[in-house]
């Protein structure tokens, strides 16, 4: 190890997180920046590696929707036959510098945000938020869902890309994040402030673009209606920041958390690309009318990269307006949770202060050693998908990773440093 101690290595990792400067550069078709999607039947998915037959029903539903969107099959039966016969290859989003919400299914012609971490020169990609209800990421694949994806490919993506390319050096994300956390966002279940700040930045540019008025109106209306639109941008920013930090390749800082409906996976800075996995839990929270916990799918999605960065459930105290929506009770409970999350982190990020937390910065650097020592696992704010494909989102709540992931990571790192069991 090039650092004298693990603590010294961890300090180097969190300094990179604090120094990171992500910029939103563009929106482009996924296959133009992710070479693994070129000229092949390939789908990206959330979480650590998983086989088609082990995917949850909603994740399989997302795959069916993507196959129909790409035109690889004419109907659901033909799509299922293609997917179950091995006609499509699957790659985790994280393996190609991407992240995907819920099912995380990303295909070649879906538009993706391009975010660059300018301090380390690395890139991250994420699909665009589709809104709520019956949407692909929650396993829905009806004609309505595919039609929306077609519009996002043909109108929303190209218009946003054209607008973002007018910003010299890209649209800086840190000022948007800093403003919005002070306005009550925690960036996983509540992104309404950040979505509106993004709209404030982008709409004057869109109105000046050389495109027809109908497209301008449609795009601005969609952005105004989609409260969670910034979530996917936040995911790409978090991915870019954490991938920059893990270039240190030492220490015990958690650099990624994600889930695929079968397993929860984490990475730590000192173990590079290796996943440490254990069976996922099922989220607990509040349900839309007509649904309850019996309908919930096991935990899915790469969106927990936001908690690895220090927001989402880690910053529950920043978003008093959403605490009851995710079933955490009231303000005192949110304060208790954030204080508990601080116990498993190395410090606070001074770039993103939370007024309702006595102006302390967001949690910085989950230390896997502290998770194991204290028995406290990160709290993740999450949407809840129906366990059967086609229903979409049925609620929102919180979920915790299995502690076994962190125990496995620490044991593996100890072995890497030469310790024996």
Image: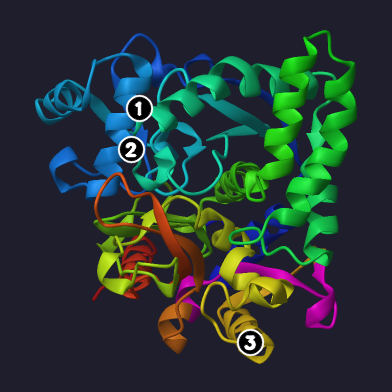
Residue 69 coordinates in the image, percent (x, y): 37, 21
> Which residue lies under the disc numbered 1?
66
Q: Nearer the viewer, residue 114 or 356?
A: 356
Q: Which residue is mark 3?
A: 330
- Within 10 Å of disc 3 (Cα), the crowding (few <14, some 14-19, many 20+) is some
Q: Residue 62 has which mark?
A: 2
Q: Is residue 367 magenta?
A: yes
- Determine whether, in the image, residue 123 is placed left or right of residue 179: left
**Which residue: 46% across, 24% down?**
147
Magenta stretch, residue numbers: 353-370
Are discs 3 and 1 less than 8 Å apart at CB? Answer: no
Choose the circle earlier in sequence order: 3 or 1: 1
Residue 20 seen in render: no
Residue density around tag 2, few if under 14, some if 14–19, many if 20 or more, within 10 Å: many
Q: Is residue 146 above or below residue 223?
A: above
Vertical placement of residue 111 versus 223, above or below: above
| Quarter of the rendering occupied by the C terminus | bottom left
Depth check, front residue: 50 or 253: 50
Residue at horizontal 45%, vertical 77%?
377
Which residue corresponds to the image point at 52% horizontal and 48% vertical from the top-left? 132
The answer to which image quadrant residue 45 occupies is top left
Residue 137 location (% of width, % of height): 42, 43
Residue 418 position, x and y percent, is 34, 65
């Amino acid at each position: 190890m090039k650092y004298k101690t693990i603590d010294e290595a961890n300090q180097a990792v969190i300094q990179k997180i604090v120094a990171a400067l992500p910029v939103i550069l563009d929106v482009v078709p996924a296959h133009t920046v992710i070479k693994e999607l070129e000229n092949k039947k390939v789908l990206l998915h959330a979480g650590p590696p998983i086989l088609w037959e082990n995917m949850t029903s909603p994740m399989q539903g997302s795959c069916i929707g993507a196959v129909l969107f790409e035109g690889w099959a004419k109907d659901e039966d033909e799509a299922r036959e293609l997917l179950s016969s091995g006609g499509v290859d699957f790659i985790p989003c994280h393996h190609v510098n991407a992240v995907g919400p819920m099912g995380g299914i990303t295909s070649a012609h879906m538009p993706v945000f391009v975010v660059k971490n300018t301090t380390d020169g690395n890139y991250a990609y994420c699909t665009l938020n589709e809104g709520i209800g019956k949407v692909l990421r929650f396993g829905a694949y009806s004609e309505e869902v595919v039609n929306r994806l077609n519009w996002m490919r043909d109108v929303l993506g190209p218009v946003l890309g054209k607008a973002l390319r007018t910003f010299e050096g890209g649209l800086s994300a840190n000022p948007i994040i800093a403003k919005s956390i002070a306005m009550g966002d925690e960036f996983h279940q509540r992104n309404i402030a950040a979505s509106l700040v993004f709209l404030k930045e982008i709409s004057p540019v869109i109105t000046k673009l050389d495109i027809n008025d109908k497209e301008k109106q449609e795009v601005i209306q969609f952005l105004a209606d989609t409260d969670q639109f910034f979530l996917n941008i936040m995911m790409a920013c978090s991915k870019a920041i954490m991938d920059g930090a893990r270039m240190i390749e030492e220490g015990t800082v958690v650099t990624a958390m994600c889930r695929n409906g079968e397993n929860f996976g984490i990475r730590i800075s000192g173990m590079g690309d290796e996943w440490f996995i254990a069976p996922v839990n099922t989220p607990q929270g509040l349900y839309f009318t007509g649904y309850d916990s019996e309908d919930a799918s096991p935990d899915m999605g790469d969106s927990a990269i936001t908690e690895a960065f220090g927001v989402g459930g880690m910053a529950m105290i920043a978003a008093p307006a959403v605490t009851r929506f995710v079933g955490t009770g009231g303000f005192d409970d949110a304060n208790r949770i954030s204080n508990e999350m601080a116990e498993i982190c190395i410090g606070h990020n001074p770039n993103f202060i939370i007024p309702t937390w006595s102006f302390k910065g967001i949690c910085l650097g989950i230390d896997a050693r502290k998770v194991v020592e204290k028995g406290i696992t990160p709290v993740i704010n999450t949407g809840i998908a129906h366990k059967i494909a086609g229903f979409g989102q049925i609620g929102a709540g919180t979920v915790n990773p299995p502690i076994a992931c962190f125990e496995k990571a620490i044991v593996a790192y100890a072995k890497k440093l030469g310790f024996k069991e």
